[in-house]
Image (cartoon, grey):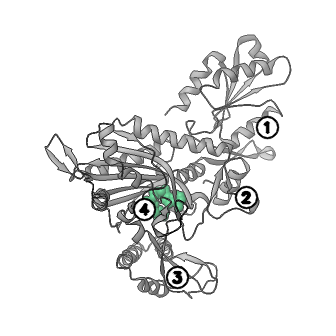
Amino acid sequence: ENGALKDIISHAKEYGFVYPSSEIYDGLQAVYDYGAYGVELKKNLKDVWWQSMTRLNSNVVGIDASIFMHPTTWKASGHVDSFNDPMIDNKDSNKRYRADVLVEEFAAKLEEEGKAEEAKALEQELGRLLEAEDLEAVRQLIIDKEIVCPISGTCNWTEVRQFNLMFSTQIGSVADDSSTVYLRPETAQGIFVNFLNVQKTARMKVPFGIAQIGKAFRNEIVARQFIFRMREFEQMEMQFFVRPGEEMEWYEKWKESRMKWHKVLGVPQDRLRFHDHEKLAHYANAAADIEYKFPFGFKEVEGIHSRTDFDLTQHQEFSRKKQQYFDTEINKNYIPYVVETSIGADRLFLMTMFNAFTEEMVGEGEKAKKRTFLKFHPALAPVKAAIFPLTKKDGLPDVAKEIFNDLKYDFNLVYEEQQSIGKRYTRQDLIGTPFCIAVDHQTLEDKTVTIRHRDSMEQERVAIADLRKVIGEAVSI
Ligand code: ATP
């Protein structure tokens, strides 16, 4: 079993991965900062995603759109009118909840108890009520099912209200309604409004995709579970434009390709699953989540959505600018359909931490000790290799620094000469460094070093001249 949420939170803080934002002021709810190793891990995750999207697929290119967009964008996309979550308060504890999440969690519990039919019926009922915007009936459902507040244990609920998740602010120095802008709640719209710019200037032909990594902001009603649900987070989205009628084929392809990606990065099959959506968003004709088995249950990490021509059609209507593409192969003008893959970099980070966190007993009998290490895929590890002179004497540090300087252009390394070698190994285990390279007296004679492997703790002698190759092969995917 992997660690519990509290183990991950404290490990992440103690070893330089994630801290609460502005912690000296007691933090800001659902906002977090990444530390020295966290920033490297997150950057590696983003790089691997970016490369697999844009380099492995010659028909996918990237963009970097701004966070602020013309406010009409969010009218057209439907966010101003309907990017809402239903909220409800418990009158006894004064705690606020998402009404839909209360019901979904109750359904998940039913499923665990083997009442899958009942759970499914409940989810469908919830979907119907939300679609009809019958908030009073949602409240009644919560009361009928006797869903209680986990804090007060009572069922004394307020009415359900819709709450819009977009943050707004004013642009320019005059504050009036016309100057209201939003912090984008998703990166996708930056891609849609640039669809024709990119298609023309990068000379793309349907089918093609546009990928983007960037910040998104949502004023989440309940922000729990660490970086699983944040108010400021980063998304990695790819919108794939296809011929109308071919979207299902591409939807299946991207589902499969994205699932494979997670497995290649070392997530075991039994911790991943698809969850096909029963209730679809207004813009979608098919949707599935890739879920990971967190200690708090199977939860969405990534969404794959067939968004039809909804977004481009809306933008065409609101901007009065044609969003059509002329397909020379079939001699037809059309608004392309879109298949999207959307994953949160932070949620992926959390999954990666859980998946890597490993505790095992080493040694026998009374000498047995617990060893904690982060078993990252070497491609994701914040530090690829640590270089240690065995002692500070006899010129060993000079040789170690020489190795460091030779390899630092290719890999993120650390050099460490303080403390015993055992302590230095432990420290690297805790941040998930796959290789520790020790320079000892034999090195002076035969130009070899010891490589100590993180997962097996095995050591082997390797020629200095081979280090680049050994590390290079391990960190490539
Ligand atoms: P949820 O149901 O968990 O609120 P969602 O279905 O609204 O998520 P999408 O709008 O599909 O999520 O966003 C795509 C991805 O962005 C999600 O799969 C998730 O990885 C990430 N994401 C969404 N909201 C947040 C958040 N508040 N904090 C961190 N990551 C998020």
Which numbered disc covers residue 71?
A: 4
Residue at 37% x, 74% y: name it: 127
Say which residue label 3 marks. Answer: 147
Q: Residue furthest top?
A: 445
Residue at 49% x, 62% y: name it: 182
418 and 334: which is toward the camera: 334
Say which residue label 1 marks. Answer: 423
Q: CA distance from mark 2 to mark 1?
A: 29 Å
Q: Is residue 278 above or below residue 207?
A: below
Q: Is residue 293 above or below residue 464?
A: below
322 and 226: which is toward the camera: 322
350 and 362: which is toward the camera: 350
Say which residue label 2 marks. Answer: 23
The kind of secondary structure element at disc 4 is loop
- Mark 4 Cβ and ligand 1 under 8 Å apart: no
User: Residue 36 lies in what quarter of the image?
Assistant: top right
Q: Is residue 134 left or right of residue 213?
A: left
- Look at label 4 and name its amino acid: Pro
Q: Is residue 263 above or below residue 135?
A: above
Q: CA distance from mark 3 to mark 2?
A: 35 Å
The kind of secondary structure element at disc 2 is helix
Q: CA distance from mark 1 to mark 4?
A: 55 Å
Q: Residue furthest left?
A: 331
- Look at label 2 and name its amino acid: Glu
Q: CA distance from mark 2 to mark 4?
A: 33 Å
Q: CA distance from mark 3 to mark 1?
A: 50 Å
